[in-house]
Amino acid sequence: MLQNISIRDFAIVPQEELEFVHGFTAITGETGAGKSLIVDALGLLSGNRADTDLIRQGADKAQLSAEFELPQGHPAVEWLRVAEMDDGTSCLLRRVISRSGRSRAWINGTPVTLNQLQDLGALLIEIHGQNEHIRLNQTPERYRLLDTESEYQDLLKQVSGDYRKWSSACSELERLRQTAVLDPAEIELLSHQLEELESNALPADEIRELENEHRRLTRGSEFMTALESADQELAEGPSEAGTEGIVDQINRVITTLKPALEADDRIEESVRMLKEAAINCDEARQNLQRIASKVDLSPQRLQMVEGQLSQLHDLARKHRVELEELPNAIDALAERIENSRSLESRLEECTLAESETLKSYHLSAKKLHKARAKRANELGETITSAMQGLAMEGGCFKINVEHQAESAPSDRGSDKLSLLVSGTAGVPAGPLSKVASGGELSRISLAIKVARHTSRRDSDTENKIMPVQVFDEVDAGVGGDAANAVGQLLRTVADAAQTLCVTHLAQVAACAHQQVKITKSSKNDAVTVNATPLATVAREEEIARMLSGKVSDNSLAHARELIENSAA
């Protein structure tokens, strides 16, 4: 629900604060008073493009804001949560248009892009006016009109699922068709290369060990000298007679410390560490001896290792991989050979899968078409019925559902939707954008809203929360009983969604739950606009003025009668 709107230095409005009530609000005033400025402000707050001409003369910037109360379940609540801009049950939109041409926007105090404002604005506000045909003639909007809140939601999901399966099968089939087919000679060559790799390549850890062994063999003398010297230092000490090895020295230190240990048990930890050091040194010595005993430093072994490494390097260069990646080259080559040998059978399988998924898609798309055609007929009749009381007697509204089985599949089926309308009797129905006037388009939008509201009310479909409905010029070219019908229909729409309507008809304004009067005044060559919610007496006087151009006893009586009858 739109709670309030704040306007500052916008067009000819210096500053205005306006609060709204739930239900139907009529915006009235003299011709040219600026009634549509509120609609324009809401349009900018829902993401419409800004123009510096909208800034009041003499001001540096125009500032607009609107606050909404969002009940649980409103789609805007989820949008705000995902965008991490939620603020409980309220939503504040703010926009500033600078004289420099820069426009900035905020949602709940967070700076946002125009696209973000448009996305959220579409969930909060729906404006119906002269350009209504542009929105209604957009393909996605036609599908939303027909499919939203329909009884065939399961069919929509089935068609979408079948489309995804078919699309996946097509992608795999195309990938296989792009795969190069190998002739027998190429397969034979690759098989020979695979056999060569499998016979000579080693696992990565064995390659690393072979390289380590090669380093040992090329430094054999240095390697053995280091092992022998370390063994002497650990066990025998240097070659000079009478010098102890490290292990013997540690053991002698332990023996030396025994008297001190008896006197102070704090030394026990040091003794324990020395014993462990002696054990570790002895184990290290034994390990070095084992290594030394197994080392083969023969020239024959060096020659064999160098030959094996050379062969491995040749294979790596041949297959353009690093030495350690030779095992991966084996897997890739084996997969390529297997894919080539099985390509024909896989193509057959995938071709069959593409055919079967396409068949399933067409079956579900045909079922969807039947359900859509039925709903299109029912919804068209309901909208046509609503049009009869809106100065379009004999007019009709049709939703044409053409099943195009030969067209490319899509996730919403194979139906082409078109909207056809006739505003008067005897005129053939034609494309909405070409045969309807601006006022008719706005009234058709009203009829659509009423029809959808009736559809929800008469079905078991859970009532969804609708955006605020804003109508501009919905009563253009309307008078008499048609004006009463427009007012009552707007009041009906307001049962499902808060509704605002700019109107110059007393019959329409009398049906509102709230009436706001727009007045324009001039002072010192400055034109200003004010918006005033009308209390009972002021409202009666405004409706009386709308009826006869002036306030008289007769027009006041007629105004009271209209208000009483509209609430009955």
Image (cartoon, rainbow, N blue to C red):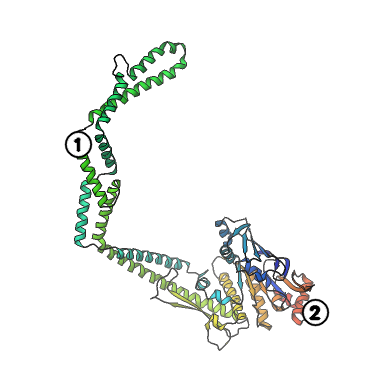
> Which residue, as the protein is rendered here, is positioned at the far right?
553
Q: Secondary structure at mark 1?
A: helix
Task: Give how far across and how far down residue 301 sits, in percent.
Answer: 19, 36
Q: Judge whether 217 appears above or below 199 on screen.
A: above
Task: Give how far across and how far down residue 113 sits, in percent.
Answer: 57, 62
Residue placed under numbered mark 1 in the picture: 301
Task: Give how far across and how far down residue 161 sits, in percent.
Answer: 41, 64
Q: Judge whether 368 appears above or below 552 on screen.
A: above
Cα distance, mark 1 to mark 2?
120 Å
> Which residue, as the protein is rendered here, is positioned at the far bottom?
426
Left or right: 306, with 148 as reference point? left
Picture quadrant of residue 436: bottom right
Q: Residue at x 50, y 74 (%)?
A: 375
Q: Nearer the viewer, residue 421 or 364?
A: 421
Left or right: 145, with 524 as reference point? left
Q: Amino acid at mark 2?
A: Val
Left or right: 528, with 296 as reference point? right
Considering the image in quadrants, where does the N terminus appear? bottom right
Task: Give how far across and how far down residue 14 sits, in percent.
Answer: 73, 67
Residue placed under numbered mark 2 in the picture: 551
Q: Judge whether 564 appears above or below 83 on screen.
A: below
Mark 2, other Cα within 10 Å: few <14 / some 14–19 / many ≥20: some
The answer, for residue 176, to whether it is visible in the render is yes
Foreground label between 1 and 2: 1
Q: Amino acid at mark 1?
A: Arg
Using the image, tell me which numbered label, if any, was put on residue 456. none
Mark earlier in primary sequence (1, 2):
1
Picture quadrant of residue 475: bottom right
Q: Nearer the viewer, residue 111 or 534?
A: 111
Considering the image in quadrants, where does the C terminus appear? bottom right
